[in-house]
Structures are given as structure tokens and as C-alpha cells.
Image (cartoon, rainbow, N blue to C red):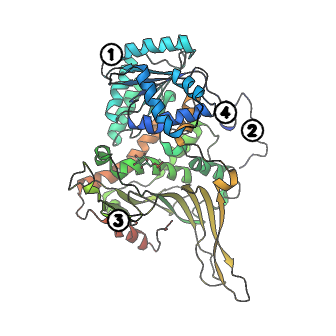
Amino acid sequence: MTQATPTPLTDANPLRVGLRMERSPQPCAMVIFGVTGDLAHRKLVPALWALNEAQQLPPGFSIVGIGRRPMSDDDLRQQVRAVLAEESRADTAMLDAFLEGVFYVRGTFEDQTTYQRLAARLEQIDHDRGTGGNRVFYLATPPSEFPTIIEQLGAARLVRHHDEEGGWTRVVIEKPFGRDLRSARELNRIVHRVFDESQVYRIDHYLGKETVQNILHFRFANAIWEPIWNRRYVDHVQITVAEDIGIGTRAGYYEEAGVVRDMLANHMLQLLTLTAMEPPIAFDANAVRDEKVKVLRGARPFDRERVLREAVRGQYGPGWIGGERVPGYRQEPNVAPDSPTPTYVAATFWIDTWRWEGVPFYLRSGKRLPKRVTEIAIQFKPVPKLLFGPTTPNVLAFRIQPDEGITLQFEAKIPGPAVRQRSVTMDFRYGTAFAVAPADAYQRLLLDVMLGDGTLFARSDEIEAAWALVGPLLETWEALPPSDFPNYAAGTWGPDAADQMLETTGRRWRRP
Ligand code: BG6
């Protein structure tokens, strides 16, 4: 099964080389639609700056912001400077040079002339800064704008295909990608009328997290786990994405999305697929994504009866977090006083494959839980015969955030003459082992886009398989408005029904 001689890292094998070595992208311009928005300020600009500081941006790299507000290049540069002022200890010369590459084009996304002005600006930048016709279009707008922008980019002939001369074009699309299977398919159709799939980067920032990528290294760069990574040894898997924050000022978005669309349909399914997938034939974009899609296709569909038995939704009421009184979801600004939007989900997934038949994957995520913690815990089956009395199960836990690391829990003899044991842990901590803070997820993902590496992005069939899986869950719940919301207090671990869902199988949620 394993190869004795590793495949050499050669230029003939660029992805393998690329993913392992320092990489530098070709000169390019990044066009950000929605440059004055929250995402651009909170994530994109700081990530680009971090790449700049790490000297990973190509020479001549340029940012072109597009927005409706009347602003000049200098106004946008001031905004970028202000965003970076909080973060950066950079010397001013470096910042000034970075800002020289920042430009602004004013216009609405529906207006053809916006794209004509954009095209002229990009040509000028190619000429002045040597960006060679290479473009990344970043759609950091509300999703309702995606179709218009994509169609207009196509109509304005701003998209070059790989077989054309004169530079490459890529598009980055933020989540949520559709709100159900039908709308995701429709959006994929629109995207594919203009872009080839290889030009499309659907972002899920969980895949940019170092600890998430480490799941693949842990599984496929070590021979010792593979023999036990299956139904013979694994009792069940728990995937928890707990957040202590509420929804802040995002009610407009969250009322439409809810936790299933916001977390389960994307971030959590990514964690599930990386944990459950078969070894890919190579570490490249299509090989990895082929295996992830197979997990989603192998997942047992949710029918109504299964939703009622094996899924739980919740919404937080008022409570206490970190000693502070916090409002319930329905009391948050701009939330309907009788909102049925779930802020908590727990669901049982079954992957009906040879590897996983009969092993439940319990996924849960919620806002306003007692703390922020993301972990994947693999719980192993008990020993067949208890020689020394009762045991605590062996658990391998990936701590995705915070305190990034991996722990293995096993039984050990308590020193002394008595035959007694208790559970102890072996602990790997990223911070201690590598002594570097992990880079922000967007930093890694933006670099991958510029390098043309789509491994850590969702492919169209993956998105559709994810919606096909969670769609019936959403439909069932939307057809049956909840009668018990709010059903958990802020600062608690979610509704009682979620505990019962596991207790009926003789299991319990971890309290990470
Ligand atoms: C976003 C969701 O995609 O992920 C947010 O829209 C959520 O609701 C966030 O808070 C969580 O990301 P992270 O990186 O803080 O775990």
C-alpha cells in the first residue's frame, strides 16, 4: 500500500514541489469588490499586509478596490493605512511602498461602465507596475451581488482563459455559496458560463487554518494511524465548533443563514471530510477534492424521520458569559422577536462506506456556548476484556483552536502496589513544538490563489454534494417551526435534547 521510494520532488511534479517549498507567485493585481466592507477590512487587507511583511507578495503586486462610494486612490490608501495602523509595527517606507500599489475604481456593480473603467485601470497598472495581465477578482460582497459581478466581468471581456496569451484570471468567491442545492447549482452554472472550474476559488477559511491542514499530515504522513482509522477500532467521532460570541452586528446576514448555513454546511463538513476521507493518490487539488467529495456522497441522507431522531436545533436565550450578562438571540439588534433562526445544531452523520459503516460522527456547533473551542475527537472502542477494572475510553483529540495541538488519552497504572489505573494524556502543542504563531487562514489562502493552487478550496461538485446532504435537514426544520426557542441559556452547552441524542446511544458529549 505504501511506496518504499518517495516520489522525487522535481519540476516535472510542480504541485508536490510547490506545496512543500517556499513559493512565490507571479506579479498580479487583486481586484476587490466590496473593498470598503467588513471582510476586506478585517481579513483581506491584514492578510495581504502579512504576506507583504513575509515578502511573499510578488513584485508590482497591486490592489484595485471597487465600490460605490465616491473616493480617490488616496482615500482608499488612507483607509488601508488606518486598518493597518492597529496591527502593524512596520517601517513606514515598507508601508508607503505597499500603498503605492493601492487603487480605487468607483462604480456600481450593475453598471457596464464600471468594468470599462476597471479594464482601463488594470491595463495602466500592467504597464506601470508590470503585473502582466494576471488578475485575481475577489468577490467580498453580499452573495446577492455575485451573479451580477461574474456576468459583468464576462461581458466586459475581463476574463482570460488558461489557453489564451496575456496573463491569467482567477476568481475568489466567499461563502455562503448558495443557500440550498438549487441556488448553489444555479450559481455554479453562472460561474461556469464565464470561468473554467480551474479558475474558481470558493473560499472556506477553515481550510486555511494550519491545524486543519495538519489533519492530512497527521493521517497521511504517519503510518501508525491508518490501521486503526476505521470501524474496527473507532467507536465514534465528535466534531465541536463552539463559539462564545453571539451574532454581534450581523443579524441581517445571520437571520437568513442560521447555524446550518453559516457553520454546518461548510466549515464543519470540511472537518468531517478531512477526518473521514480515504488517502488521496497525490497531494494535489483534484486528488484531495475527489476524496472529500466521496465522503459527502457516502454520507447517509437525512430524511424527516432521521432529522427528528438524530438532529437537534437550538437558539440561545439570555445568560451569562465570562461573568457578563448577555442578551438572548431574539433580543439582539435587528433580530425578529419571534425569530425561528437556529444558533445551535447537533446532528449525527453516518458515512456508509467500508471504512466507516456503523461509526457515528456527531457534529455540533453553536453561538454563545461557554467558550470558544474547535476540536475533533476520535473515541476508540474499549478493550475486549477488563483486566484491571473499568477504563476510560482512548481519545485522540485534534484541538483546532485555541491552544492548537493534539492529545492522546490513554490508561496508565497509578504508581504503588495496588492494581489501579487512570486516564492520562500525551500532549502535542503547536506553540511549544514550533514556537511560531500560526499564520491567519486568509494569508495562506490568498497566497494559494496567487499561486494557482486550489487544493484548499471547494470544488463545484463538493459544494453541491454538501448542499445535497444538509438540504433535507434545512427543509425539514423550515417546514416545522420550532416551538421551544429559546431552548438554551447563553453560557451553557446547548439544549438538553442534544445531550439526550447521545445519551440514548450510551455516549456523552465531551466538555472540552
Ligand atoms: C464564519 C462565520 O465563517 O466563521 C461566523 O460566518 C463564525 O459566524 C466564524 O463566527 C468562525 O470562524 P473562526 O475562524 O473564528 O472559527
Q: Tell me: 67 left or right of 125.
A: left
Q: From what the image shows, is residue 492 above or below residue 297?
A: below
Q: From what the image shows, is residue 461 above or below residue 137?
A: below
Whether residue 166 is visible, yes or no, is: no
Along the line of sight, the residue nearer the viewer: 482 or 462: 482
Image location of residue 42, percent across then percent down: 45, 39
User: Which amino acid, by three-letter code, is at mark 3?
Assistant: Arg
> Mark 3 = which residue?
309
Does ligand 1 reach within 8 Å of label 4's beta carbon?
A: no
User: Which amino acid, by three-letter code, is at mark 2?
Assistant: Thr
> Mark 4 = which residue?
18
Disc 2 and disc 4: Cα gap in Å?
Answer: 14 Å
Q: Please report contact status of discs 1 and 3: CB closer than 8 Å, yes or no.
A: no
Along the line of sight, the residue nearer the viewer: 475 or 212: 212
> Mark 1 = which residue?
112
When asked about the image quadrant of residue 344, the answer is bottom left
Q: Which callout, 4 or 3, points at the residue further toward the start of the chain? A: 4
> Mark 2 = which residue?
7
Residue sitting farthest toward the right = 5
Image location of residue 119, percent across then percent down: 43, 14
